[in-house]
Amino acid sequence: MAKGFKSRGGMGRGGAMGGMNMNAMIKKAQKMQEEMVKAQEELGNKEYTATSGGGAVTAVVKGSNQIVSLKLNPEVVDPDDIEMLEDLIVTAVNQALKTADEESAAIMRQATGGGMPGLF
């Protein structure tokens, strides 16, 4: 080591993270983790509903990406046009899952405060 040079652990002025209190940073990370776990539990149990074909098909899914129910309007059941019914089912289920995913992402961003600058 050169004469007159005193090491501070190589982390810059004030130690780790440019002077940020390590204990405060750890507490913030722990709080964020607790909020994320709570949000994930709530989202996993929440139900999302979507329809297709003007209400001909209604799909309900959980935030955990499980189908809860699927309802068909009897008028849409045409034995000669099974493909249309299949398309309506796929559309309703995908829309319900998309809504669940979008809300999940928004809630997780909120729970983490958009991340922790300087930590990741």
Image: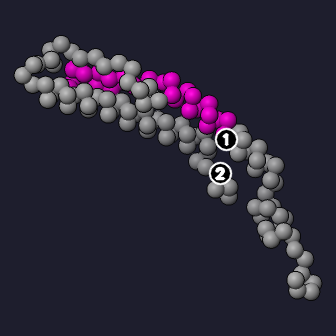
Residue located farthest toward the right when viewing the structure as drawn: 4
> Residue 37: x, y in percent?
62, 34
88 lies above or below 28: above
Q: Is mark 1 on a helix, strand or loop?
A: helix
- Residue sitting at x 44%, y 25%: 62
Residue 78 appearing in the image: yes
Decide whether residue 79 is among the magenta residues. Answer: no
Q: Find out whether the residues at labels 1 and 2 contact each other: C-beta distance under 8 Å.
A: yes
The stretch in magenta equals 32-61
Residue 26 is left or right of residue 58, and the answer is right
Residue hosting label 2: 116
Q: Residue 84 carries which label?
A: none
Q: Which mark is residue 32?
A: 1
Say which amino acid is labelled 2: Met
How many numbered marks, from 0 up?
2
> Residue 15: x, y in percent?
83, 64
- Residue sitting at x 67%, y 35%: 34
> Residue 110: x, y in percent?
58, 40
Q: Mark 1: give few (<14), some (14-19) or many (20+) Cα within 10 Å.
A: some
> Residue 36: x, y in percent?
61, 37
- First in sequence: mark 1 or mark 2? 1
